[in-house]
Image: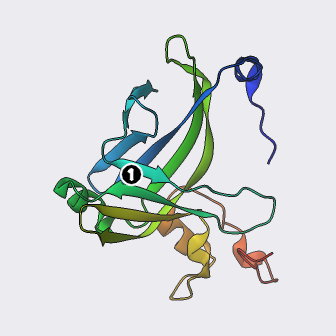
Amino acid sequence: MTRSLGSTINTYLAGRSHIRISMIEIQTSTGTVYYTDGPFSVSHAGNTYLAQGTFLSVTDTEENTDLVITNCSINISALDPANITKFATSANVNKSVTVMGTYLDPTDNSIVGTPIITFKGKITGYTVSNARNTGKISLAVASNFADFEKINGRRTNEGSWQKLYPGDRTMEFAHQTIEDINWGKP
């Protein structure tokens, strides 16, 4: 998908010094958390994205024109017991995650232009791993169509779709399609 970066970001990228950070929004059963991989917290759209601390990393995703399911992992420290109760719970499955990339002005650390959404999906599961001196929670996140590979009771009809995405009319005329829809297959 071609993206238009806008004149502000294009001017910034023409410069000599670039600071790029990621900003992550994770919906949980107790509310939305905001993290950044930047060296300090940043504010955007009324939210403060907390720097480092318990957020460790997000894996890279690949964007292409094929209808495939993309996924990534978000790693969070398991050393804080509050993170275990917040993230290591099945109540977070199907909660939304948004990953954005943005640039910072090196003179005042302000956000340049509008952050660019690089990935949007839902939590599909989690794992907790412990080592001698560290621990990690990995949230498995996949694009919104990841659930279509599940066969257990999922139907491509308006009723099933409305249970997951109330108000979204994507499957309104699915019953009129005679052909099979091969989701996530090239």
Left or right: 118 as drawn, with respect to 77: right
Q: What element carries label 1?
A: strand
Horizontal and vertical percent position of residue 32: 35, 46
Find disc 1 in the rendering and name its residue: 27
Instruction: Please give left or right for residue 164 compared with residue 67 in the image.
Output: left
Q: In which quarter of the image is residue 43?
A: top left
In this view, the residue in front, 13 or 16, is 16
Q: How many labels does the image show?
A: 1
User: What residue sits 54% from the left and 11% below the top?
Assistant: 107
Q: Percent x, y for residue 72? A: 55, 61
Q: Which amino acid does label 1 sit on?
A: Gln
Judge from the rendering whether residue 39 lies leftward or rightward of residue 145; answer left or right: left
Q: In this view, does 80 lie above or below 126?
A: above
Question: In percent of the image, x 49 and y 18: which residue is there?
Answer: 109
The residue positioned 27% from the left and 61% from the top of the image is 134
Q: Quadrant of residue 60 in the image?
A: bottom right
- Using residue 72 as the reference point, say whether residue 180 is left or right of it: right
